[in-house]
Image (spheres, helix red, strand yellow):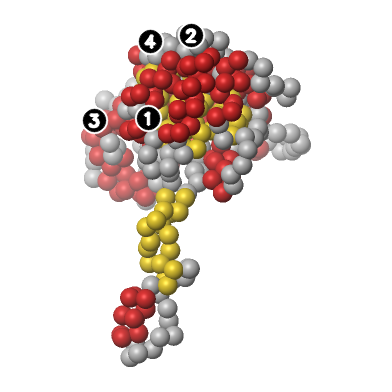
Amino acid sequence: MTTTMEPFARNVVHFVRLLRGAGLGMSPAHAVDALDALRFVDLSRRDDVRATLACLLVHARDERDIFDAAFDLFWRDPDWEGKLRALLLPKVKSGMPPPKRNNRLADALATRAAASKAREAESKPEETHARITFSSQERLSHRDFDTLRADEWRTLRHQIRAHRMPLATEPTRRLKAASRGTHADLKASARHAVRSGGDWTVWKYRAAVERRPPLVLLLDISGSMSAYSRAVLYFCHALLQSRERLQVFLFGTRLTSATRALRERDPDVAIATLGQNVADWSGGTRIGATLAEFNRRWARRVLSGRATVLLVTDGLDHEAIDVLDAEMQRLRRFAHRLVWLNPLLRFPDFTPRARGVQAILPHVDAMLAAHNLDSLRAVGPELAALSRHTGDTKWN
């Protein structure tokens, strides 16, 4: 590539990195393909450049809005109608307002701005001291969701979206071919012996097929759970995008299925839509009545195949405790495993004194914390440990 094309090539690479930071599936190969294709395009025609990059970098319909917003921000030049001077296209400015809908793009822009500032700081020779401290992201992972400022919450949402919960697998009754194992496959061993001239020195085996059991999440969206329920929804969105077997239900004063809404590719759009369409968001709590509706309408449909139920609530319900106890007992019979994620475990001296907590606690297999990023990251390993060991209810 010629010297005049080198700055333009660097900007194309930075643009692909920006799209990858905004959540699109980009790789270095996409930047190489874009550079090869742009050799045959008149770079003074802005629409041709946009169309060429869109053909190569956009893979789904819902990615086009993010691409258009990123293109307008990154390749903004008042002289596009004239000739490009030395093919130097300006990069995005940190003070440029991001589009309101594409929060993923705003997060990617903020990350690039912070990285550029860090590189500038490292290039200064007088600033060579190092402080032994935690990074801002590491500090945020310990912070309670309910104590975060708006800017801290925005940074934390980006971390939640990038996280993938390692879910446990369980053996099934189905068997598959394996190089070693405890189940000898006599038919496969005999066929191999026939092909080898009667040599039975090599044995074939079959092993149990491992698969992840389905998850059903019941999420309390009452006023006391507002900050925690939004954080959990971002984790649910990441699981659904990675094709996990997950069903999500929201409950406050009524029950709402949120699985279809969370399949939207942009998590900010999905959760904002839920906040607008769910009438009882940040309202009151009727845990017993909503569990009764779930057991009557949904339990037999979604609690099959050794499903694990994650109940995310603080249990602060003082209405119809006898109904709550009966419906929890009924839910326990439907579910293979019932785990309670309780934000109140953030208090070291927490004791189950509330009547709602006392009604729920005897029917769960485990009660885990769910008040910060570290506690949510620990849910996957805890579920894996719980699938290997059975015992009394435990608190973590």
Residue type of the residue flagged with mark 2: Gly
The spot of residue 176 in percent (x, y) is 37, 63
Tell me the CA gap for discs 2 and 3: 51 Å
Nearer-N-terminus badge (3/1): 3
Tell me the CA gap for discs 1 and 4: 23 Å
Residue drawn at x 26%, y 32% as measured from the top left: 61
Circle 2 residue: 284
Tell me the CA gap for discs 3 and 1: 52 Å
Element class at badge 4: loop
> Is disc 2 surrounded by few (<14), some (14 to 19) or many (20+) residues within 10 Å?
some
Residue type of the residue flagged with mark 3: Asp
Residue drawn at x 60%, y 31% as measured from the top left: 367
Q: Label for residue 299?
A: 1
Nearer-N-terminus badge (2/1): 2
Residue most toward the bottom?
197
Q: Nearer the viewer, mark 2 or mark 1?
A: 1
Residue type of the residue flagged with mark 4: Ala
Circle 4 residue: 279
Circle 3 residue: 47
